Amino acid sequence: MNQMDLFTAKEQGLLAETERKQLEGLSQDELGDLLVRVRRLRDKYSDLYRRQGHQSVKRTRTRAAASDSNERTLQKAEILEDSLSRVARHLSQSARANANELKAGRLEVARGERDRKGPATKGGSATRNAPPESARSSKRSKPIVEGARVGAVSATTKKNQAARDNRAKKKTKKRR
């Protein structure tokens, strides 16, 4: 039996769109839309396979006997998984190519502006375009504590304070 015979006519049309020759002419947005449609169909058959397996295990009370009952659904899910990976791979290649084109364009514009302005001179445009003093980095002597260290610093401080409080209590008890 042909693998395409497992699917409806509409699903066969969707699978035909995922062939390499068909993917070549699609834009990045169209590839994204196709990816979503194929993923939905793949998820549908994957979920159906799980549900059918669950029902047949309930019915037969053994996993071995239940595993053969929904083989067609598993084949559909696997075929759609292959199609999904093909579309995702093509989309990532397209996105990478577009990013490289944009980067080249930005670099070309930047080179053109640099050539037009000429090299920066000492005390020239570099200081005129510098941010004001208030926007520059602060002159903090201690670094800002970030992430998990915030809790550790706080816990250490609390522990030290508790120790000081206990020493102070002991001194007041001795004086009485």
Image: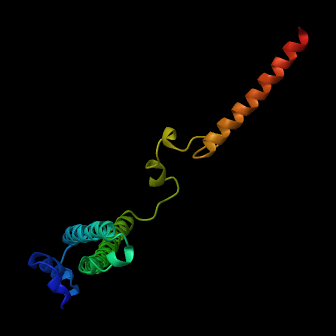
Position in image of residue 64 (x %, y %):
38, 78
Closest to the observer, 74 or 64: 64
- Quarter of the image with the C terminus in it: top right
Of the pair 70 and 44, the residue shown nearer to us = 70
1 to 130, vertically: above or below: below
Which residue: 29% across, 70% down?
A: 56
Q: Is residue 129 left or right of residue 67?
A: right
Residue 72, position as x, y percentages in the image = 24, 80
Q: Is 156 left, or right, of 15 in this rendering?
A: right
User: Is residue 142 in sight in this rendering?
Assistant: no
Q: Residue 94 at what x, y percent from top left?
A: 28, 76
Front-lying residue, 93 or 59: 59
Q: Residue furthest top?
A: 176
Q: Residue furthest left?
A: 9
Colour mapping used in the image: rainbow
Choose top left, top right, bottom left or bottom right for residue 146.
top right
Report the residue that reaches farthest toward the front. 60
* Residue in view at x 51 percent, y 40 percent: 133
**Location of residue 112 (image quadrant):** bottom left
From the top left corner, tell me how far across and down residue 101 is, in percent. Answer: 31, 74
Marks counted in the figure total 0
Left or right of 93? Residue 159 is: right
**Of 33 and 173, the residue lying toward us:** 173
Q: Quadrant of the N terminus?
A: bottom left
Q: Is residue 56 visible?
A: yes
